[in-house]
Image (cartoon, rainbow, N blue to C red):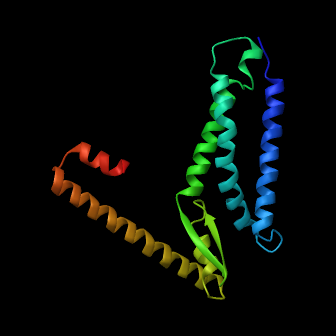
Amino acid sequence: MATSVGSDLFTLGSLLLLGLLVLLLLRHFLPLRSNPAYILLPIFLAIFLPVSIILLLPIDLASSLRTEDEATRGVWLPGPVVLAAWRITYWLTFALTWYITVHKQRPDTSLISLRFILPLLGEYIDSGYRTPKDRFVYSLRSNGRYQLIVLTCGVGGLIYVFLQNGFRGTSVKALVMA
């Protein structure tokens, strides 16, 4: 039975290097000390996770080979580790990238924040109110307005598909997939 110690060390080293490169990229475009962690962490993960997929894909392909010869496999990891890595990467990438807003820091720059866990955070930061309650209410209204617009467009698209194709399950499935 072959062990994956060398592959484990290479993978950990590669992930640490990727994390360091993402931090250097963030440091180049954002002042790390003046931005709060609740802004920097989602941006770090939104960059780090898709880049880590570039590393994870060849490891997954090498791990799925049906040979026991370690020299021909290259960098490989055990099946449960690869499965857990894909699940973590997929769901965190999905959670961070489905909701995108642009924050204006100064008139000449903008900061793109990708988040799911705290979708109200962006509007909370951008609001001009001073008290947390007023900021939160403004954030709720802005996000509620956005969700209402998206829901209205979705219902309009659903009505259009039903009028064009009739009421069939495949029509709804095609609309949801699009």
Residue 60 lies in quadrant: top right
Residue at 27%, 64% (x, y): give it: 156
Q: Is residue 169 above or below residue 95?
A: above
In screen coordinates, is 166 left or right of 150? left
Residue at 72%, 60% (x, y): give it: 41
Residue at 33%, 66% (x, y): give it: 153
Residue at 67%, 60% (x, y): give it: 42
Q: Nearer the viewer, residue 43 or 91?
A: 43
In screen coordinates, is 82 left or right of 116? right
Q: Measured from the top left, where is residue 89 in percent x and y?
A: 63, 43
Q: Is residue 33 above or below residue 70?
A: below
Picture mark count: 0
Residue 74 lies in quadrant: top right
In screen coordinates, is 118 left or right of 19? left
Q: Nearer the viewer, residue 167 or 57?
A: 57
In screen coordinates, is 123 left or right of 68? left
Q: Measured from the top left, where is residue 157 in percent x and y?
A: 28, 60
Q: Quadrant of the N terminus?
A: top right
Q: Is residue 151 above or below residue 84?
A: below
Residue 106 lies in quadrant: bottom right
Q: Measured from the top left, where is residue 47 in percent x and y?
A: 68, 55
